[in-house]
Amino acid sequence: MSDVLSYAAERAPSAILDVATLTYSTIRAVGIQITSVIGNDDALVADIRRAGVAVGDPYWQLPLWEPYRELIASPVADLRNEEIGEGPGAITAALFLSEFVGGRPWAHLDTGGTAFLDEETDGLEPGATGHGVRSLIRLVLDRQTATTGESS
């Protein structure tokens, strides 16, 4: 994923979003009905959360907590891609990924608990949920409306 984020950052987009199940530690924080979102741009994260509310995809913001960067420090590399010991895996994974976005506005949607259902819930069949797709479409449409003034 770091390669893709670097590639995207080289193209200087207005924002970079990624959706992935990195560590599954997000499940301990928010369970299996909420997706955590972590990013380096509070406005982007707020827009994602707002889009999620509009389409029924709930998000909870986890902090991109800089003091945890020490958990991915390495004596032999720039960074470790895994934290030392048991800890805030979703946050340290996001800290790792944030190194590859070139300072661009970025957010990570951690679908560790929401990407797949073992049993039917809220009208969704068991299996892959596609969580995040509806809210990302809503986000793009909302940002288009904000830019052009045309409603979607």
Image (cartoon, rainbow, N blue to C red):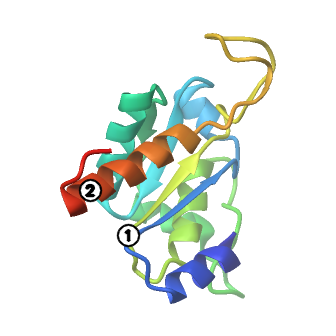
Name the kind of residue labelled 2 in the image. Answer: Ala
Location of residue 151 in the rendering, given as x and y in whole percent from the top left corner: 25, 45
Q: Nearer the viewer, residue 10 or 42?
A: 10
Residue drawn at (26%, 53%) of the image: 145
> Is residue 14 in view?
yes
Name the kind of residue labelled 1 in the image. Answer: Pro
Residue drawn at (59%, 82%) of the image: 6
Relative to residue 3, is residue 146 depicted above or below?
Answer: above
Q: Secondary structure at mark 2?
A: helix
Cα–Cα span, label 1 and label 2: 9 Å
Q: How many marks?
A: 2
Residue drawn at (64%, 32%) of the image: 114
The numbered dot on residue 105 is: 1
User: Label 2 near label 1: C-beta < 8 Å?
Assistant: yes
Q: Earlier in the sequence, mark 1 or mark 2?
A: 2
> Is residue 88 in view?
no
Mark 1 burial class by Cα count in 10 Å: few <14, some 14-19, many 20+: many
Residue tagged by mark 2? 43
Residue drawn at (46%, 83%) of the image: 102
Relative to residue 113, is residue 63 depicted above or below?
Answer: below
| Left or right placement of residue 94 versus residue 127 in this view | left
Mark 2 burial class by Cα count in 10 Å: few <14, some 14-19, many 20+: few
Q: Nearer the viewer, residue 17 or 98?
A: 17
Q: Quadrant of residue 117?
A: top right
Residue lying farthest to the left in this orientation: 149
Q: Quadrant of residue 105?
A: bottom left
Q: Secondary structure at mark 1?
A: loop
Location of residue 90 in the rendering, given as x and y in whole percent from the top left corner: 59, 50
Location of residue 28 in the rendering, given as x and y in whole percent from the top left corner: 61, 31
Quadrant showing the N terminus: bottom right
Q: Quadrant of residue 112?
A: top right
Location of residue 152 in the rendering, given as x and y in whole percent from the top left corner: 33, 44
